[in-house]
Image (tube, rainbow, N blue to C red):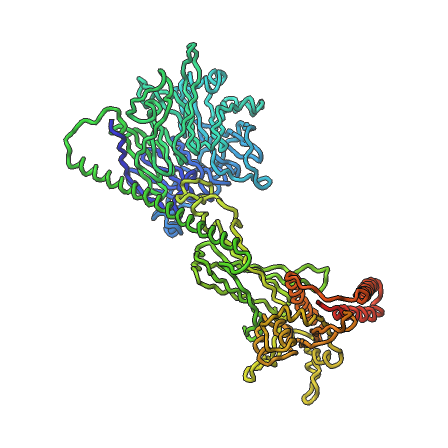
Amino acid sequence: MAGPAPRVHYLAGFSCPVGGLTAGGPRVLHLGAEVFLAAGRELVYVYDREARQLTAVYRFPGQVWHLEVLALRRALLVLCARSGIYCLSLDQARRSVSQSDGDDEDGESPSPVTPVDPDTCVLPDATLCAFTVLGDLLIALAQGPAQWKVQLFECPCPGEHPGPGGQIGEVELSTHTPPAGSPGKPQAPHFLPVLCCVSLPSSRARPGPPQGHRALTLEGSLFGLLFGADAALLDSPVILCGLPDGQLCSVVLQTLVTSRSAPGDPKALVRILHHLEEPIVFIGALRTEPSAEGPEGADLDCLVALGRHGRTLAIKASWDEAGSLVPELREYCLPGPVLCAACGGDSRVYHSTPSGLCVVDLARGGTPGDPVQPDGPGGLPPLLCPTSLGVCSVVTLSAASRSPEGGTELLALSAKGRLMTCRLDLSPEPPQPTRVTAADTGRKIKDLLCGIGTVSERVSSLKKAVDQRNRALTCLNEAMNVSCALLASREGARPVSCTTTAAWSRRELRDVLTATCLLENSSGFRLDRGWALCVQVLPGSHASDSEPAGSAVTYTVPVDQLGPGDRREVTLLLGPGEDGALDLPVTVSCALFLSLREVVGGALAPSDPFQDPSLDGCPPDVLPEQEGICLPLSEHTVDMLQGLRFPGLAAPPAPAPAPCPPPGDPVSTFLGTCWRPGSEPVGPESLRAKYLPPSVAAIRVSAELLRAALGDSDSGASLCCATLQWLLAQNAAVDAVRARALTSVQALAPDGAEIRLIVQEVAVAGLCPAGPVQAVEIQVESSSLANMCRAHHAVVGRMQRMVVEQAARGSSPPDLRVQYLHQMQANHETLLREVQALRDRLCTEDEASSQATAERLLQVYQQLRSPSLLLL
């Protein structure tokens, strides 16, 4: 037999989100010539196949999860996400709004969009996830805070009071605990549950109220084996629930009705039929053996359930060796993931995967025309072999009916929003040669063109996925190479380096201190998409020890397309702020960061959104927000010595502007108004400099230690000049200091206060038995105590690093007088004890007597800042 030859006809196109529709949300069903379609968002379309036009568009307050049509009542039931069930009359006026309302922002259709009245919500319940209709009963599945609940209501009627008649019964599926969300509002399930009703053949013959979705009619033997003798004796329909965790549960409808008046044990009402261990996406039934009544009126003898990843369950009544009737359960593994499925009016199951639409036959061993026979009379085939139908990107499927020409007709919606019919001629008889007419030739050409269109969609989708993965693999390979190169070169020249320099510049009529980070790629690799330079600025601690350190600020700058030999420069503003203050030192840390979300997030998530359904229509989070690779590059400290300005060293045509006091300073304003022309300036800085002695701190370093540390880099200059140039090596004014061979400089702090650095040679006696030790003394003077402390801290830091480097080289100090060192240590310990006593006294004294204590404490601090110790 020849393979199946589907004929695809496109009916209409509907706009969809960027990237395509997502499986699990769209729904399509039909009622005669009318097709009701939900594309996974808040719109429901009504399409007339005979007129080939869109007749109505309804806008609901949320995403549409499920649709049901009440045929004789001419009503449409719609379940909205986190809202409830709405009931609309299909005979009401559909164009009750102006044409302007139809101008949807997405360009959905030329038909006006009708907003749904909130009063049509017949069952407002935010926990509802699925429902179905059986006769005059509405069966809903709700997600409780800890369990799934099956609830039974009277079916609503559209009209003035469309609300349901009240709840009839309820039972908890206590075997499953959904993922918990916030208190009182559970998290939405990633996969929607599936509801289905099955009944006995005798239930079909009884007259009843109009039905929305006809229950699947199972033959009596299979019905009794699955649901027990009680359900068969009660002649009651059974509710089947396929849960996202893979459980297939059943609840006898009659017991659920009586449970309201006489509640029973939930474990006795709920039966677990099977566990697929993956989300159930479809439940259906079919006929695997020929019937004299034909395919339309035959009872179904096989129950099937499909899981998300392709695991398929088939249950059928069979005979064992002893002649007893037993249920036969078989699990098959079909290609996945399964996007949607449907059962035709025969023994075939149609299911869609990202690669295409497939069909399996449970009566002939999996493939139509396959000579492999089942392993026993009436049994299920041992293996299912799917046959591809050549149609791809189908996100929702519905078996319409048997086509007039024979075969099966399917209604399908593609990922790009195309509504189409697929007519499948799967007749087992071989085709007879017939005379080819012009009409047949035209139809074949049209079918071939439709097939080319579907193949083109599939090729485009697969090419996009391959390109995404190739780009992601290329970026990851480059990231691995860069990471290995940086980690292998922790010492010496690095393949990717970042240097930081500080300098003063003029911005917005004021002087500001900026830090320039220069990122240089000296490697043979390329930094492409996803790489960023992260610069963290951590201010120094406050003056008070009890106050916390300043908060860090991080700047992230993308460095896309940084090839070998390229450079990228980033300039950051350090201060001062609006108040004129700049808290130094400031630590600037630079690191490379690769965002895995940006590089491989699109490749890990499906390239076609319908491959991985989610309730909100967006692909799930594959990686956490901050997931990535961080490679530290450098850390630089900007201290007071780098933040000094030297107006006296500037060229005469461009003198440094006079520092402006902080805005809004009441003392400066008052003293400024008291100054008269011809008199001496009486500003706060000038008064402090005139009447208060400057704060002084000093540090002494052995001349031999300095010569060994400085080496021959400053040959030709005196030791004092070389020392001052070494201290200001990271300041922009070092060239002017070197050109004039200065040993002392007058500078300005960031806040405008004056600071003086003096470097002079001294002789330290009494320390060494061989005689006085030649040393260099570095003095820091300033009228501002805070600025003096910051500058002294910067000098001490440089000296500490120098001593550590020289100690690593193995240099040994000269012979020292131990008694002299003990005496200096005792003097410093006495000063420290006095500091503690003075600080304790400040906490207990009043304001008048604490002034003298504070003055003495300041004197002791100054003595500690200028010790008689010598760095050797």
Looking at the picture, does residue 357 appear above or below residue 605? above
Indicate the position of residue 421 as horizontal and vertical percent values. 30, 36
Residue 199 vs residue 311, the one in the foreground: 311
The residue depicted at 75 percent of the width and 68 percent of the height is 869
Give the residue drawn at x 44%, y 26%: 197
Horizontal relation, residue 498 to residue 441: left or right? right
Q: Is residue 850 above or below residue 192?
A: below
Quadrant where the C terminus sits is: bottom right
Give percent across and percent down for residue 441: 18, 37
Residue ID at (64%, 71%): 707
User: Residue 835: in sight, yes or no?
Assistant: no
In the image, residue 16 sits, relative to residue 295, either above or below, namely below
Q: Residue furthest top?
A: 322
Q: Is residue 502 visible?
A: yes
Left or right: 435 in relation to 495 = left
* Quarter that holds the N terminus: top left
Q: Nearer the viewer, residue 530 or 407?
A: 530
Using the rendered view, name the quadrant where residue 662 is placed: bottom right
Going by the image, does 709 lie left or right of 617?
Answer: right
Q: Is residue 767 above or below residue 365?
A: below
The mark total stands at 0
| Percent of width and height locating residue 842 | 82, 65
Q: Residue furthest front?
A: 770
Q: Nearer the viewer, residue 594 or 157?
A: 594
Give how far across and how far down residue 450 sits, in percent.
26, 40
